[in-house]
Image (tube, coloured by chain):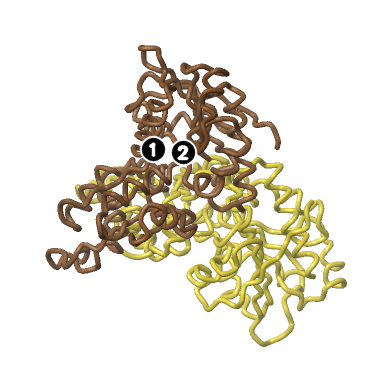
Chain colours: A yellow, B brown
Amino acid sequence: MIPDDSTASVIARVGVDAPLGVFDSGLGGLTVVRALRERLPSEDIIYLGDNARVPYGTRSPETIIRYALGCSKELAGRGVKAIVVACNTVSAVALDRLRAELDLPVTGVIIPGARAATRAAGEAPVGVLGTLGTITSGAYTRAVASFSSRTEVLGQAAPLLVALAEEGWTEGDVPRLVVRQYLASFFGPEVVEGFGLPRESRVGCVVLGCTHFPLFRDLIEREVRDIGGRGIPVVDSARETANDVEAFLTSRGMRAERRQPGSLQLLVTDKPRSFEAVASRFLGADVPAVELVDLKPE
Amino acid sequence: MIPDDSTASVIARVGVDAPLGVFDSGLGGLTVVRALRERLPSEDIIYLGDNARVPYGTRSPETIIRYALGCSKELAGRGVKAIVVACNTVSAVALDRLRAELDLPVTGVIIPGARAATRAAGEAPVGVLGTLGTITSGAYTRAVASFSSRTEVLGQAAPLLVALAEEGWTEGDVPRLVVRQYLASFFGPEVVEGFGLPRESRVGCVVLGCTHFPLFRDLIEREVRDIGGRGIPVVDSARETANDVEAFLTSRGMRAERRQPGSLQLLVTDKPRSFEAVASRFLGADVPAVELVDLKPE
């Protein structure tokens, strides 16, 4: 999460009861917040969704870094003790710069998912579902290679799942058919056409490589089991990230000491009402009032 | 298309054989180019897709106007004789400003579609399928009201159709189920649930109010007929816009005089190769080499 050991100065500055800062270009990162709250129920969390500038995926690396610095500094200014980059695009290009410029631990969502996937896949390839930007960036391929040079990565861009998640169509025939179609590239076409059992399982696990996709976790697990056979795990990057954050905070003595449930503050850079209307689907809980913030220009 | 009669100066400046300029924030406007080429095969066309800044729909009106001026000036600088704004978002907020600042005829895609829809709907409401931005902007409601104060407009945001069009999933079960679900708000739930014939047709026509949707025209026509009954027309804004442009050019003596097929030049502000890869689906024809341009900052 942070290479050097500067956490003592962070504890001295803000204290262990300071909130975790989480940001994303929009809504998706709320699935990471959900996982963090399940794993670390006593932690306060401040979430920033930079929805005025969504999507980040189509921007240049320089622009993404500039936006990510803006979000991180806003959170740092609010006294967070660590920053969780709940966005695959930012995690792929900006982590090193954020760590260099902020005196805070910073983690992303790709490394935790890639580590768990490499472990889960055994000798087989890792299948990654992500946005077109994430897949074409090769970020998971590089991350998996950092854990095992022998593990192949098969990427499948699944942009319709983003659109379905934002529409709230997470159950029923449409998402089922869409998931089935996307999984076809991992398991071969015979199965999808309905001509019997799979000849072979091409991947050893399937990674939910986009923060929107935990909304389809049950469905994807069911479909992976149906068409790929039992025993192929689905790796949820959001959950793996929460596991990593817990392990990090624990090892550095940075867990909140309070016992009551942590608070959640939601900030957005545009349209707080629209954000409120769809956020609960991602958060899996009631949504507190959403606050509009104006990021300082870099 | 243009309120005053300044077309004589345009003809004197660039000549009737000058190209038409068409722009959009991305790919969708190519369906308007397709309709223009069917209707006006001798016209040269320059198309500009500002895909570096797509989507426009989430930006403020000031930003949209700034971007639209940038695109229009780029086309004006290339000597076009008229500008077709092949983008619903820009058509809704920027036409007046473009007309004020450019010495060129300028038309959008909303008025032609709204005019045809008002005529087609008779006494019944007009149903509009569009992006969330177009529907919530009320642009079609205002445009229809300018033709008939008695005609009601029912809007249905259909964002999944944009995602499906860009994925190339325009046939099969998924788009059919998605279209059926979206049309439900126009025709009542009984039909969609499959319990027999419609009780009543709530709308008198369905407008394809997004430049991506002509890719689903056959499918939408079939579904409208199946669940809404015969005789409910589907109005294609792209085609109506082409009809309007033809009528305008003819009435002003601005039709190209040459007889051979017109040329097509495609410009984008980002990723020409990705654009090329999916453009033929929207254009309905082979795609010429796509050129990258850098818009002058405003």
In the rendered image of this protein, does residue A40 appear above or below residue A292?
Answer: below
Q: Who's the residue at 40% across and 12% down the image?
A: B258
**Residue B204 placement (x, y as % from top left):** 25, 56
Q: Residue B212: x, y in percent?
A: 40, 43
Going from the N terminus, do you reach mark 2 or mark 1 first?
2
Q: Residue A1 vs residue A288: left or right?
A: right
Query: Which residue is label 1 attached to?
Result: B241
Q: Are marks 2 and 1 in contact (CB under 8 Å)?
A: yes
Whether residue A206 can be seen here = no
The front one of B99 and A103 is: B99
Residue lying at the far left of the rendered structure: B196
Q: Position of residue A20 (x, y in %)?
A: 70, 70
Q: Which corner quadrant holds the N terminus of chain A?
A: bottom right
- Could you tell whether A78 is left or right of B201 in the image? right
Which circle marks residue A159 in the picture? Answer: none
Discs 2, 1: same chain? yes
Circle 1: element type:
helix
Real-space Cα separation, disc 2 to disc 1, in angstroms:
9 Å
Residue B137 sits above or below residue B90 on the image: below
Tell me where residue B103 sits by quadrant: top right
Q: Nearer the viewer, mark 2 or mark 1?
A: 1
The total of numbered circles placed on residues is 2
Horizontal relation, residue B149 to residue B103: left or right? left
Q: Amino acid at mark 1?
A: Thr
Relative image position of residue A139 (x, y in whole percent): 59, 44
B132 relative to A245 in the view: left or right: left
Instruction: Work out whether residue A284 can be spotted.
Output: yes
Element under disc 2: loop
Q: Hey, what amino acid is under mark 2?
A: Ala
**Label 2 chain ID:** B
Q: Which residue is mark 2?
A: B86
Q: Which residue is farthest front?
A: B5
